[in-house]
Image (spheres, grey):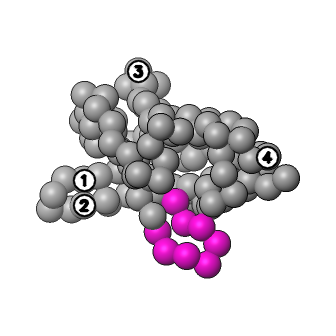
Amino acid sequence: EVQLVESGGGLVQPGGSLRLSCAASGFTFSSYYMTWVRQAPGKGLQWVSSIYRDGYTVYADSVKGRFTMSRDNAKNTVYLQMNSLKSEDTALYYCARYGGSYYGVDYWGKGTLVTISS
């Protein structure tokens, strides 16, 4: 059974940092492209970043230069290091697996809440 479990969310002041983790199980982690997606209160889903199997990363313009996504294939875990946090980064952050062009994003975690407030 595929499982994605996020952790690391919390309440942080503007300008602060957080590191989110997503522990994966039930599949060959190193073979998959992984993604972070967020949903701000009352808004739709917003793609944040993705990491290819080889570690190449891509980011949304809104987080570029502030967020860094990485993966540890030995630990079956992806990370999202978030620096210089802003109030508009407040959201529920989901980790997701990309199953390829045919399936798209096929598995999601339950999310971890990030709140940026003074």
| Callout 2 amino acid | Gly
Q: Are marks 1 and 2 in contact (CB under 8 Å)?
A: yes
| Callout 3 amino acid | Ala
Q: Which residue is mark 2?
A: 104
Residue visible at 21% across and 62% down? Answer: 103
58 horizontally vs 19: left or right: left
| Callout 4 amino acid | Gln
Q: Which residue is mark 4?
A: 13
Binning the other alpha carbons within 10 Å of mark 3 as few (below 14), some (14 to 19) or many (20 upward) gives few
Residue visible at 29% across and 43% down? Answer: 33
Q: Mark 4 and mark 1: span between their CA atoms?
A: 35 Å
The quadrant holding residue 19 is top right
Q: Which residue is mark 1?
A: 99
Residue visible at 71% across and 41% down? Answer: 15
Q: Which residue is mark 3?
A: 74
Return the disc, 4 or 1, that comes first in the chain's sequence. Answer: 4
